[in-house]
Image (cartoon, helix red, strand yellow):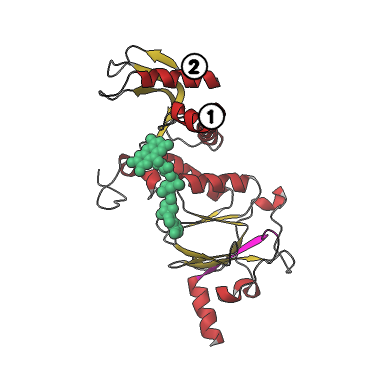
Amino acid sequence: MAPRHPVEGTSSLWQATCDMPSFAPLAQDIETDVCIVGAGLVGLTAALRLVRAGKRVVVLDSQQPGRGNTGRTTAHLASAIDDRFSELARVRGLDAARKAWESHATAIDCIEAIARDEDIACDFERCDGYLWLAPDQDPDILRQELDTVHAFGWHGVQAMDEDPVFRRPCLRFPDQAQFHPLKYLAGLCAALKRKGAAIFGDTRVENVEGGEVVVVTTEGAAACAARPRSSPPARRSATASPSTASRPPTPPTRSACGSPPASCPRASTGTPSTLIITSASSRAATARATS
Ligand SMILES: Cc1cc2nc3c(=O)[nH]c(=O)nc-3n(C[C@H](O)[C@H](O)[C@H](O)COP(=O)(O)OP(=O)(O)OC[C@H]3O[C@@H](n4cnc5c(N)ncnc54)[C@H](O)[C@@H]3O)c2cc1C
C-alpha cells in the first residue's frame, strides 16, 4: 500500500493502515478556555479529558494529527519501564519506583477505558511483556529487577527460564498492552468532534508571549490571548457548567480579539478565564483597517 502520510521520505505501518482525518487551518478568530498545541497522543488525550471536564478546547497542530511521534511509535503500552526499576530505586528510592509503575499502569488503563467508553476500534489488547538480557549482560540484572518489583509490590512479575519466542531467560510482566496508535488517534479526533472541541491542522505555534496569556502562531493562527477575569463580558468562567460544556468554541466579537497581539488584554493577576485565538488573516485585516 502506498504511504499516505510520508514524513522525511518514509511511512510507518500505522500510517499505511489507517485513514487519518485531516483538519483545515485556523482561518478566523476563535475563543476558548484551553488551547492545546500538538495533536499527538498527549495533546488529544489531554483535550478529551478537558472537554469531559467541561472546558472548551481548541487543538492546534503544525501538521495533522498523527504525523509526529505517535504515528511512528512501536506502540508497546508498557508499565515495565525501559530504564529499569532497579536503577530508579537506586537513584530515587523504592517509593519512586512504585509510583513509576503505578503511573504507567494507570496510563494503560486510561487508554483502555477511553477506547471502551468512546467506542474506538483500535485493536487494543492486553498482553505480557518480556525483558531479556543482551548476550553480554550480567544475568544478575534480571534478578535485581525482579527483587525490586517484588519489593515495591508488583508480585505478578515472574522469572522464566525460557520465553515463548526466543527461548531465553527473561522476566515476564503481566498486564501490558498493544494497540494501533493511529486508529486510536482517529477515534480521539472523532470523540473530540462529537463533544464540541475544535481541531486545526497546518497551524504552527511559533511563540508564547506575555507569560501565560499569548501564544503567537504563523500559518493558520496568529495568537491566543487570555482575557483578565475582571474584563467584561467574559463568555464564561473556566469552571463552566456541564450544560454549556458541549458547545463548540465560537468566534468572539471583534471587540474581544480584533486587535493585534500586542494590544490584546492581558491577565495581570490570577488565572486567565478565557483564551482568544486570533487568526492570521483577521489580524492582517485589522492591521490594514487601523493603518
Ligand atoms: C520509533 C519510536 C518508537 C517508540 N516506541 C514507543 C513504545 O513502544 N511505547 C511507548 O510508550 N512510547 C514509544 N515511543 C514514544 C511515543 O511514541 C511518544 O512518547 C508519543 O507518541 C509522544 O506523543 P506526543 O503527543 O507527545 O507527541 P507527537 O505524537 O510527536 O505529537 C506532537 C504534535 O505536535 C505538533 N507540533 C509540534 N510543534 C508544534 C508547534 N510549534 N505548533 C503546533 N503543533 C506542533 C506535531 O506536528 C505533532 O503532531 C516511541 C517513539 C518512537 C519515535
* Residue wearing tag 1: 93
Measuring 42% from the left and 29% from the top, which residue is drawn there? 84
User: Identity of the amino acid at label 1?
Assistant: Gly
Q: Hey, which quadrant is residue 274 in on the image?
A: bottom right
Measuring 45% from the left and 26% from the top, which residue is drawn there? 86
Q: What secondary structure is the magenta-colored segment mainly?
A: strand
Front-lying residue, 217 or 251: 217
User: Identity of the amino acid at label 2?
Assistant: Gly
Q: Does the magenta stretch include residue 274?
A: yes
* Residue wearing tag 2: 156
- Secondary element at tag 2: loop
Could you tell me residue 220's position as x and y percent? 45, 66
Q: Hey, which quadrant is residue 138 in on the image?
A: top left
Q: In the displayed structure, would residue 50 be above or below residue 209?
A: above
Could you tell me residue 193's position as x and y percent? 53, 50
Q: Which of marks 1 and 2 is in front?
A: 1
Residue 29, visible in the rendered structure? yes
